[in-house]
Amino acid sequence: MAAWLVRRLVASIAIVFAVVTITFFVVHLAHGTPCGSDDRPLPPEVCQRLCRRFGCDKPLWVQYVKYLAALARGDLGESIGLHRPVADALADAIPNTFTLALAALLIDFALGLALGIYQAVRAGRFSDVAVGNVALLVNSMPVFWLGLVLLLVFAQWLRWFPAGGITNPVLCPRIDSSYCLLDFLWHLTLPALTLG
């Protein structure tokens, strides 16, 4: 058992190292320098300043070693697009991501349990086969496509749900917290249904 755990640990470390290495080189090949990642040309002095700031003027192996050292310290770097540390951007997104994942899990569990009980009670009947086939069809759809269909039908055509956002930024700060909670759940419904 201990040997198996050690093998799994070593394999996991090797996989993480390979993914980190591949990510570094793919991003470096795709963007090159901060100046090469945008369609708008920058003045040469601005490009040189950005290259010095982000270390693009150093040899590739030096950039790679600095990248590994920064990752070991937990420093994920600075986002060129957001102009802020990547760790801060991730920390801001984690609560909403966790909430969405939890809501999708609860919907998945509730729907799975309800449909499973329904199919068990009506085993072998037409409704059992129909529910099973519809569930199979929905589960076989790519999630992004299902999300677009739900947005098109329920947000665009029927206008039952909002097409984006977490809450209504105009109304929520001015109204009591119970409205904000309901508004948040209303905005959460379509994404959670898509993932659930």
Image (cartoon, grey):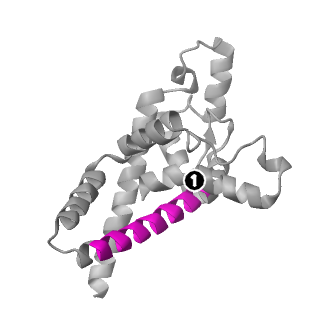
Left or right of 20 on screen, residue 120 = left
Label 1 packing within 10 angstroms: few (<14), some (14-19), many (20+): many
In the image, 15: left or right of 47?
A: left
Q: Is residue 19 magenta?
A: no
Q: Nearer the viewer, residue 88 or 31?
A: 88
Q: Which residue is mark 1?
A: 188
Q: Nearer the viewer, residue 5 or 174?
A: 174
Q: Which residues are magenta?
A: 96-118
Q: Quadrant of residue 150?
A: top left
The residue at 64%/48% (across/down) is 166
Q: Nearer the viewer, residue 100 or 158?
A: 158
User: Residue 18: x percent and y percent?
Assistant: 35, 53
Q: Amino acid at mark 1?
A: Leu
Q: Residue furthest right?
A: 174
Residue 144, picture quadrant: top left
SS type, badge 1: helix
